[in-house]
Image: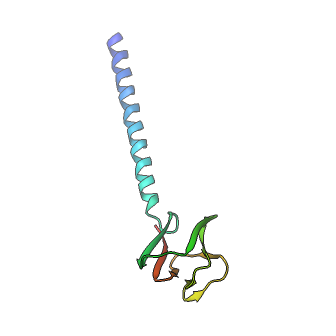
Amino acid sequence: MIDVVLLAGRLLLLALLYLFLFAAIQTGIGLVAGQRKKGKGAWVITVLRGPGRHARISPAGDGAVVEDLSSTNGTVLNGVRITAPQQLRPGDTVDIGSVRLKVDRS
């Protein structure tokens, strides 16, 4: 009788272990798949050309803001020179002197 109870306990423990591993793997797969969604990741700013910088890009809420720091050549957002801080959107290009940045989401 005791052998039957021990066998049932071992089978129950094994079943619980498999359920735990299955749930852990599903959660891990969900986290990895969730990182690939566009628009949900961190901001990515890529330097496209040039060495110098005379502006500040800061996080602001769910996005980022570019601000000219009184540079000689100014800061240009999508071809327009900015005079006040401007909200950045995915796909924007920012020219800071001879530096060109592209804004996107990961």
Q: Is residue 82 above or below residue 21?
A: below
Q: Residue furthest bottom?
A: 79
Quarter of the figure that contains the N terminus: top left
Residue ID at (52%, 68%): 39
- Residue 8 at x, y percent in the picture: 37, 21
Residue shown at the point (45%, 59%) measured from the top left: 35
76 or 5: nearer the viewer? 76
**On the picture, is 64 further left or further right than 22?**
right
In the current view of this chain or complex, which residue is farthest to the front? 72
What residue appears at the point 47 percent right and 77 percent down from the top-left corner? Answer: 102
80 shown above or below 24? below
Across and down, in percent, residue 49 comes to 41, 80
The location of residue 82, given as percent across then percent down, is: 62, 83
Name, please, the residue furthest toward the top: 1
Position of 91 with respect to 29 (left or right) is right
Judge by depth and name the residue closer to the eye, 61 or 5: 61
